[in-house]
Amino acid sequence: MTQRVNALGQPIGPEVPEWTPRPRPEKTALIGRTCRLEPFDAARHVGDLHAAYAADAEARNWTYLPYGPFASEAAFRAFAEARFTGEDPLFHVVVDQESGRALGVASFLRIDPVNGVIEVGHINFAPALQRTLMASEAMYLMMARVFDELGYRRYEWKCDALNAPSRAAAERLGFVYEGTFRQATVYRNRNRDTAWYSIIDTEWPALRRAFERWLDPANFDAEGRQRRSLAVLRAGAG
């Protein structure tokens, strides 16, 4: 692509023709084949979530979050009712379509309609949800809302640079590593260097096709094992 320059001969970015601010995501459900994402409802979700998180006996899920774990369901309820009901972060509860149980949460945050940028974060998937088809489908559904439904230009993933599972998940899902912000924040009385990842709108069509092929029931055998990995499909090798 030829570099654009202004009348002074200075390089400038490409035009974004007819750009308008994008709508904010609404508190409406996202429905998939194996899971659905619902707006938080304490009466329906607190008991399931607390029980699901209790399976994480070592509390590994909470290491890289600035809150938790919670000693009781009452303590978790008080926290969730205060934090899971706002507009930004906008929390979604991941519910197993088969059992109807809530197994985790994820949120949209740092929502920037003017520039078309939105981040996914506060991801806390209980052990029963981790490394499952449901977990990947939940992330796909959120991506599809951002790009296809709302028309955003950029979708971000940020995590503690030492959080190897989060970094691996971002890369598997198709996020591109952009760099590390040193000494970005302090949480739990310790430093956090923040690793930044993103997907942009021009990358989404190919990524969506890979997800759709991966999520196709035909891609899984009778025991639920994948025939082709998402990484293979993203690379166009499957």
Image: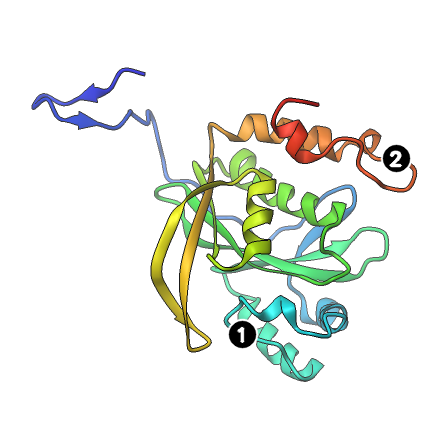
Q: Is residue 182 above or below residue 200?
A: below
- Residue that appears at 68% across and 61% down: 104
* Numbered circles on residues, count: 2
- Say whether disc 1 or disc 2 marks the residue closer to the N-terminus: 1
- Residue that appears at 35% across and 62% down: 184
Mark 1 closeness class: few <14, some 14–19, many ≥20 residues within 10 Å: few
**Of residues 195 and 97, the one drawn nearer to the viewer in this rendering:** 195
- Residue that appears at 32% across and 27% down: 16
Q: Is residue 9 above or below residue 231?
A: above
Q: Residue furthest left?
A: 8
Three-letter code, disc 1:
Tyr
Q: Secondary structure at mark 2?
A: loop
Q: Position of residue 144 (x, y in %)?
A: 59, 38
Per the model, the C-alpha gap separating discs 1 and 2 is 39 Å
| Quarter of the picture holding the C terminus | top right
Task: Give the quarter of the image for residue 153.
Answer: top left
**Of residues 26 and 224, the one drawn nearer to the viewer in this rendering:** 224
Any mark on residue 146, and which?
A: none
Which residue in the protein does label 2 denote? Answer: 221
Which residue in the protein does label 1 denote? Answer: 67
Three-letter code, disc 2:
Asp
